Amino acid sequence: MHVDLILDSRLSAPEITELGLLAEKYGMQTIWVASYLDSREPFVNLSQLASQSSQINLGPVALNPFDTHPIRIAAGLLTLNELSSGRASIVIGGGGEALQSLNLKTVKRVRAVRECIEILKSISPSHSLNYNGEIFQVNNYHPFWATQSMPRVYVAANKPQMLKMSSRLSDGIMMSDLPATLIKRTVEEVSAHLVAFGRDLDDFRFNNFMAWALYDDKEEAIKEARQWLGYRGLFRRWVITTFMSDADYDLIEAHKQEIYQMPKLNTHSVPGVPDSLLDKLVDHLTLTGHVSEVDQKIEHLLALKAAGLTDVALELRQNPAASIKLIGEQVIPALKN
């Protein structure tokens, strides 16, 4: 199983570059930069790393076609791919907190993502693209200068319709915060679709987006993980009720806005939600603890690998260089065995 990293999108280009080159040294596969409303522009922020690195892949996660037209996504992706000599990738999704903040309506979400993927996968420097979709139309798009091998296009997918569409069109899926039981079920479902579509299972990637917080101060790690729970795919009953009751989920759902506000308020508790419940979410949705607990986290990752995961994307926040060193020296060798 390969290890990817998701770096804080609010870091500067020099910081992203320094961390990306360190990750490349340890043999990590991809640097992803999340696209949040208050983040730096991801393509631009990765451009310095693209030109200075030689092996590591890189790209944004997850862009959506509701706030950015697919052709504008394509222009950024192909430019990054040129700067990196063919090492760019992208994750396309149908959600994200930016959509809520901008009050954008995600009408026909699966179709919109499908048309975006079809556009991205149809681009060629050898001919003009004309596309007449229900949602998006393109006339005479011809990036003749984009001569590198075309980027890999992933879909942020967890539910049946998006998974089926992804199986037909994309190069892989990025799930988020799923336990081994649900990953196994998803891999089996998507594999059946791949066979039905006549695709090679070995060419398709299964990734899972997870938060990583192993520090010398375990209390600080837990505080960080709690604070960002709203961004951890938390509000999905079908996931959360695999380890807690419907009543507990109802309590979490009732405090959705307060949970989303924790990063902005720099707090790690929510009035009305017991800390013990937040800690249970941290235990099941993230890889959090003291650095001495790294072996337990490796066992968790090995269980995900056994369930069919081919890649894992670990999101880093505080002191990412120390986390990269720990992952590079202990986690990557264990996952290769």
Image: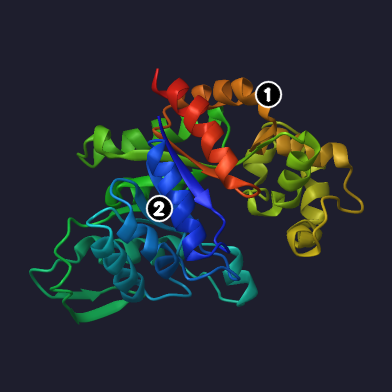
Residue 285 % position (x, y): 65, 38
The amino acid type, in three-letter code, at marker 1 is Ser
From where the camera sits, is residue 61 visible? no
Q: Is residue 145 above or below residue 254?
A: below
The circle on residue 155 is 2
The dot on residue 292 is 1
Q: Quadrant of the C terminus?
A: top left
Q: Residue furthest left?
A: 126
Residue 131 in the figure: left or right of residue 6: left
Residue 153 to residue 179: above or below: below
In front here: 109 or 228? 228
Query: For the residue marked with disc 2, what is the amino acid?
Result: Val
Q: Secondary structure at mark 2?
A: strand
In this rendering, is residue 164 above or below 70? Answer: above
Q: Residues within 10 Å of mark 1 (few under 14, many from 20)?
A: few
Residue 222 lies, in percent from the top left, at: 76, 40
Which residue: 19% across, 39% down?
198
Q: In the rendering, at what x and y percent does residue 2 appear?
A: 39, 34
182 horizontally vs 117: left or right: right
Give the quarter of the figure containing the N terminus: top left
